[in-house]
Amino acid sequence: MPRMRKKADLPTKLCPACRRPFAWRKKWQRDWDQVKFCSHRCRTSQRQS
């Protein structure tokens, strides 16, 4: 069984829309380099501005 990682040990980025840090998620493991926004809400609000 794989070891659990602490959330503090995961890579983080800063969301350009809300300026909050967000951590790596397993669903983003293949395209972490292309992820820019922390949520769908931030992504859509950035397009409208």
Image (spheres, rainbow, N blue to C red):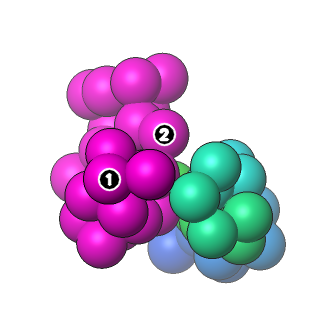
Q: Is residue 26 visible?
A: no
Q: Is residue 39 visible?
A: yes
Kindly identify the amino acid type of the residue bearing the numbered disc 1. Gln
Q: Which residues lie in the magenta part? A: 26-49
Q: Quadrant of the N terminus?
A: bottom left
Question: SS of the residue at dot 2?
Answer: loop
In the depicted structure, whether residue 39 falls above or below residue 35: below
Residue in view at x 30 percent, y 72 percent: 41
Taking depth in this image into account, of 35 and 10 the one nearest to the observer is 35
Q: Position of residue 17 (x, y in %)?
A: 57, 58
Q: Position of residue 14 (x, y in %)?
A: 71, 53
Which residue has dot 1 on it?
48
Q: Quadrant of residue 20?
A: bottom right
Q: Position of residue 38 (x, y in %)?
A: 46, 62
Residue in view at x 41 percent, y 37 percent: 35
Taking depth in this image into account, of 21 and 29 the one nearest to the observer is 21
Question: SS of the residue at dot 1?
Answer: helix
Residue in view at x 73 percent, y 64 percent: 19
Q: Is residue 27 magenta?
A: yes
In the depicted structure, whether residue 44 falls above or below residue 28: below
Kindly identify the amino acid type of the residue bearing the numbered disc 2. Lys
Q: Could you tell which of marks 1 and 2 lies nearer the N-terminus?
A: 2
Is residue 28 shown left or right of residue 24?
A: left
Q: Is residue 20 magenta?
A: no
Is residue 22 shown left or right of residue 32?
A: right
Q: Quadrant of residue 40?
A: bottom left
Which residue has dot 2 on it?
36
Is residue 8 shown left or right of residue 36?
A: right
